[in-house]
């Protein structure tokens, strides 16, 4: 009902052809014309459902309680709007207007998700800590990172501890997710 209401209300009010997709089959089978396409967040883990279509002005993702790693993946993948179902109609309207005009848009719950929990510490990492963290996620040992960066292994271990503290994690398996690369393998 919510989607039908938004589709009619925003479509009529702003002149956009809005389509919601909560299944891969619906997305693949849809022939309806649209300039804004909103994909349910639960389809993203497979990532093969997300498509780039030059005919569509805006790709958006909607869901409830989007987590920081999903938000980061969407941003890197070119998703233009992130909409949380917990936010009000006014926020959705503003976000969809921005999306329809080709701008990036996020509702306030999405922004809060990045500024709390895992997302908060990322902006506090120094440039060197970010380099170290990215190399560690790629599977380099502390010794290999030290060699590549021209520093000592002890310095890299101290930087690793600092990264973990700033990201609010306690083990290496949490690092990929905390950096927004999705869940650690």
Image: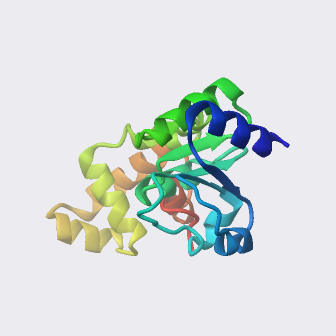
Of residue 174 and residue 60, the one placed in the foreground of this image is 60
What residue is at 65 percent from the left and 47 percent from the top?
A: 66
What residue is at 78 percent from the left and 44 percent from the top?
A: 4
Seen in the picture, residue 48 relative to 124 is either above or below; the reply is: below
Give percent across and percent down for residue 86. 74, 34
Q: How is the image coloured?
A: rainbow
Q: Does residue 104 show up?
A: yes
Residue 150 location, quadrant: bottom left
Seen in the picture, residue 44 relative to 88 is either above or below; the reply is: below
21 left or right of 156?
right
Q: Quadrant of the N terminus?
A: top right
Q: Quadrant of the C terminus?
A: bottom right
44 left or right of 35?
right
Q: Does residue 111 show up?
A: no
What residue is at 69 percent from the left and 74 percent from the top?
A: 29
Give percent across and percent down for residue 31. 64, 69
Q: How many marks?
A: 0
Of residue 8 and residue 135, the one placed in the foreground of this image is 8
Residue ranking furthest to the left: 150
């Amino acid at each position: 009902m919510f989607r039908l209401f938004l589709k009619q209300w925003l479509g009529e009010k702003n002149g956009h052809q809005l389509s919601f997709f909560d299944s891969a089959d619906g997305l693949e089978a849809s022939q309806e014309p649209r300039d804004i396409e909103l994909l349910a967040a639960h389809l993203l883990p497979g990532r093969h459902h997300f498509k780039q279509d030059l005919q569509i002005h805006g790709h958006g993702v909607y869901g409830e309680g989007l987590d920081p790693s999903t938000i980061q993946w969407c941003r890197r993948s070119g998703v233009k709007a992130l909409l949380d179902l917990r936010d009000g109609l006014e926020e959705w309207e503003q976000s969809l207007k921005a999306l329809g005009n080709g701008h990036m848009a996020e509702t306030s719950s999405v922004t809060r998700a990045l500024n709390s929990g895992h997302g908060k510490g990322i902006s506090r990492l120094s440039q060197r800590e970010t380099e170290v963290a990215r190399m560690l996620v790629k599977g380099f040992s502390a010794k290999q990172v030290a060699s590549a960066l021209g520093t000592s292994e002890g310095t890299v271990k101290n930087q690793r501890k600092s990264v973990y503290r700033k990201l609010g994690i306690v083990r290496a398996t949490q690092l990929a997710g905390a950096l927004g690369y999705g869940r650690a393998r």
